[in-house]
Amino acid sequence: MHSFWIIFKQAFITKARTKSFLITTGVVVAAFFLLANVSNIIAIFNGDENEENTLHVVSENPALLENFQAQLVLMNSEIEAVPTYLTEAELQKSITEGTIDDYLVLMLDGQLSARYVSESANEMGGGAEIENAVQAIHTTITAESLGLNDSQVGQLFMPVEFERQAVSESSKSQEELSQARGLVYVLIMLIYVAVIYYPNMIAMEVATEKSSRVMEILISSVSPVKHMFAKIAGIGSLGILQMMIFGLAGYFAIQTAGTDLTEGVFSVMGFSEVKISTFLFAILFFLLGYFLYAVLAALLGSLVSRTEDVQQLMLPMMILIIIGSLIAFSGISVPEASYVTISSYIPFFAPLVMFLRVGMLDLPIWEPLLSIGIMLLTIGILGWFGARVYRGGVLMYGSSQSLKDIRKAIHLGNKK
Amino acid sequence: MALHVDQVTKKFGDFTAVDNLSLSIEEGGMHGFLGANGAGKTTTFRMILGLLDPTEGSVRWKGKPITYASSPEIGYLPEERGLYPKMKVEEQLVYLAQLRNMSKGDARRETAAWLERFEVPHYGQKKVEELSKGNQQKIQLIASLLHKPSLLILDEPFSGLDPVNVEMLKKAILDFQKQGATIVFSSHRMDHVEELCDDMSILDRGKIVVGGSIKSVKRSFGKQNVRLNMDADLSHLCKIAGVDNFTKTKDGAVFQITDEKVAQILLAEAMKLGTLRHFAVEEPSLEEIFIAKVGKSHA
């Protein structure tokens, strides 16, 4: 057990000290802070355009202007309507000169009419809001002329009750679905990146040790199986640490940004109602996916003699991950599709696809458990098989670049 | 017997790499392994180390099979040199020694002492890839014996070294033997084996063709060399009965004989031809034995 920890520590510390690891971690953390503060940053750049919110109103009727101003305040609009005493010709000149952006002409000639003038017709910054405000004033005036009282007007404009309801009890309501979707999407992305990144690291490690021939010394000191699993555990822990750093960075980024999770970018992602179980499943499926692919990567890495050949041998494994991710990403909009259900039990796709289903649907607990069981079994079989290949593979040198070498490796490492 | 290799055979498919090989080495002994490329030296070493399992036969170290439990007792310098190119020398040596169950503190102290001995104390903080090949070899040797193994296996320890470094490493290996270690090493260089070893074996196509103490090997070879240095033409002397072979040299000739008595006849005959400057009966060199034994079977 002693040597297991030495290899574990070695794998963990040397990788944690590499420049690429530090840079990646730094860049991602920085990206989180940038993303969380994106609305503040946009605000900084928009700061000098505040005067755009001033709308010049030409009106001969001061009561109408007051009414309009009151309506804008009611609508929480940022537009500030100010009366102007310039003529329309002068205002148009100002627009072409760029000193003002737009102006509005309000007229009450029996019927309310308005004309909104801006530099180009499709520049609709506040156009819609202004139109709404004018419409509201028009409604009030019309209601008054028809002799309706306030409550009658209120009834007229009562919004209709419209609710979406799902028949299936297991399915989440539309609202819940869209809330879960963003978070699940982000977490699938993370699992996807992690099961590519860390197992690749392992394959590279193993191939480097083999190509530098230090492997023969290592496996004459400790058993190849112990070496392989210590390495997988070491880099796995490093992965967990990195993910935890990302998690904390994300949390603090949001805290310091001063926005809460229901606003801006985050409202789209649906972070407002986060279920703890989703996070726990994400960690669980990350670990399972990692071990599954790490064993496979160690096996493949042990077959090559030169680090240049690693990518070539890793290709089949990458394709598996990519197929899994395609199913998962496409399944986000149709989590109940049968192809999603089936592939969530296939061990190589399960880390991504079963997590998607767990995150999006209310599954009976046996479903994820069955999938986890299948994965554990596969990891066990692969671990046993991988250890056999590894034992021989690490002793094998030559132009080994194909999967056929697995047989040769098993043969070489065979116990009689 | 400390190391006992008993009728070991290793087959890779149809190919027999090591064929019914037996070997016994006493505790504290130094055994030289000679063999052409592909003779099965590395495969034998890998079986002794337990990296490969013999198809038949067994290997025992102090009466027990070698497993990873005996890892702290064993040191290995592989033929293909291997160190982490990007790791610092000291860190690397300490790591490898720790894998063999040495404590970190001891490993640090020993590393410093060995670097000092090999006159490269400042290399501790250098990366391996920055060192010359000869110096990497020194580090590799340190890696094999830092943890004070009682059985040290060295696969071609001197290949690619300059004569000064060869001497330095030879002396280190001899000193290590004096401290009680049992050492097995392989080489292409007969002179190294002759100089360092008590016992030796010549391996050819997975079989030991000659084995035993160097003295007994030479004696049992049954041939000696008679060196005659004189100016006269000696070529007709090869017709004397008992002379197997005749080689002209710069100063005269060397006759290979099977019977010691023939040497006296040669001397008498030569003296008739003129002034004899030098006469000597020489032991055969390992090189001759090697070529005779291995070269013949290849023919």
Image: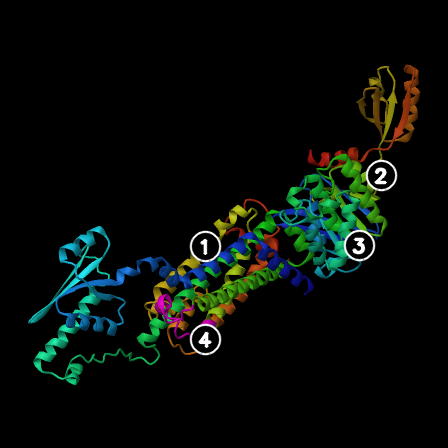
Q: Nearer the viewer, residue A179 or B152?
A: A179
Q: Chain of mark 2?
A: B
| Chain containing mark 4 | A
Residue drawn at point x = 36 percent, y = 61 percent? A43
Marks 2, 1: nearer the viewer:
1
Disc assigned to residue A316? 1
Q: Quadrant of residue A58?
A: bottom left
Q: Could you say whether the residue bearing mark 2 is in a helix, strand or loop?
A: helix
Q: In terms of sequence position, does the residue under pointer 1 or pointer 4 come before the other?
A: 4
**Residue at screen point 74% across, 40% down:** B158
In the rendering, at what x and y percent does residue B54 appear?
68, 54
Q: CA gap, disc 4 to disc 2?
A: 81 Å
Q: Residues within 10 Å of mark 3 (few under 14, many from 20)?
A: many
Q: Position of residue A115 (x, y in %)?
A: 13, 62
The amino acid type, in three-letter code, at marker 2 is Ser
Mark 4: secondary structure = helix
User: Height in image: A109 above or below B240?
Assistant: below
Tell me whether marks 1 and 3 sit on the same chain. Answer: no
Would residue B254 be found to the left or right of residue A171 on screen?
A: right
Dots 4 and 3 on the same chain: no
Residue A203 in the image, given as x and y percentages of width and height? 54, 54
Name the front one of labels 3 and 2: 3
Whether labels 3 and 2 share one chain: yes
Q: CA distance from mark 2 to mark 1?
A: 60 Å
Q: Residues within 10 Å of mark 1 (few under 14, many from 20)?
A: few
Q: Nearer the viewer, mark 4 or mark 2?
A: 4
Residue stretch rendered in magenta on the structure:
A258-279
Q: Label 2 belongs to which residue?
A: B220
* Residue A277 numbered tag: 4
